[in-house]
Amino acid sequence: MQSEYFITSRNNQHIVALTEVQFKELKRAKKRLSSSFAVAHKYRLVKANFEMTVDAMARLGQLYVEQAGIEAMETAKPHLNACVNNFILSSRMFTSQLKRHVQACLPQNRRSQQQLTEAIDREYHGSFAYRFVDSLYDYVSLYGISIHTLIMESVVSEKADGTLSRQYGLKAMVEKDFIGGPAEFRALVFDEIKAPVNLMEVFGQFNESVERLHHVALELVKDVADEANATVLEFLNVFIAEHGTEHDNLFVVHKTSARHEKVYDKFPLSMYVNNHNMDSDYV
């Protein structure tokens, strides 16, 4: 059985031949870029969902201030819960998959895995917010909703001209009495809860942990990501030089002579350079 390796445009109009060694080199580079980008992408998901939760809180709080009708309130509350749940889900995606992505970039580097494991352990054992959000994912997935109580607070302050100003704030709380007990919430974390938990407060603290882990992970994979990016760019430039124009959708193909030229393996290539803002993460 004979094999053929090449880079091709999406419509197979142009082809650049590869050796088997070059094919394997590109496949390894693609895997490393994909994994390193996954670290950055999932971190951005956590940040984006946090920002949407903040916005949803602000909108619901404004409805309380305006004394909006029941219909508007009952629409805004599920939206807030959805934003909170999306934040919790994206948080678990980031924390549970981080080690796998780094390992895919550095499969033989045990020291890097140890460094990342130690960093995760520091955050877990050093931050109640980290433990709480991590436990909240299991609770929300299996048992209950993420918000038990909404509290509207107001503060009156005096301006420079002597007039009074009232400012409002909305808090979303998780009540220990409504969780259901250690059978439904991670027991050790359940025992730590001594008062209602302010969700936005712990979310903000959890974000600080995620940011630190994101930084550790990017530092670990930076060199191999840079090397992989250079490898992909080199082959893309060869393709462009040969065909005289840039193509946005290039694929690497391994085709065999078995069963009438069967495509044995195929993966996109140019998307890992063109569709990600590498400079913003790998600095």
Image (cartoon, rainbow, N blue to C red):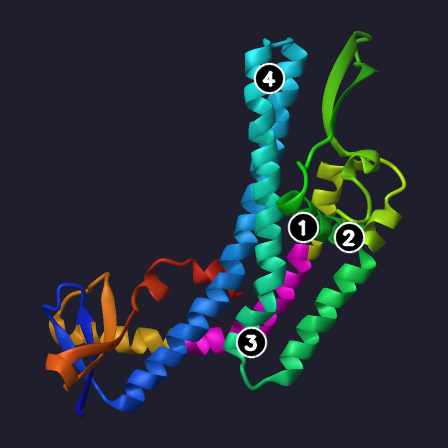
Q: Earlier in the sequence, mark 4 or mark 1?
A: 4
Helix, strand or loop status at disc 2:
loop
The amino acid type, in three-letter code, at marker 4 is Met
Q: Which mark is residue 103?
A: 3
Would residue 158 be counted in the magenta stretch?
A: no
The amino acid type, in three-letter code, at marker 1 is Asp
Q: Is residue 82 above or below residue 152?
A: below
Q: Is residue 200 above or below residue 251?
A: above
Would residue 223 be counted in the magenta stretch?
A: yes
Q: Is residue 43 left or right of residue 187?
A: left
Q: Which mark is residue 73?
A: 4
Helix, strand or loop status at disc 1:
helix
Q: Evaluate if marks 3 and 1 touch, with contact meaning CB atoms under 8 Å apart.
A: no
Q: Is residue 236 above or below residue 68?
A: below
How far apart, in angstroms, are the residues tagged by discs 3 and 1?
25 Å
Q: Earlier in the sequence, mark 2 or mark 1?
A: 1
Q: Main secondary structure of the magenta part?
A: helix
Residue 212 placement (x, y as % from top left): 68, 60
The magenta segment is 210-228
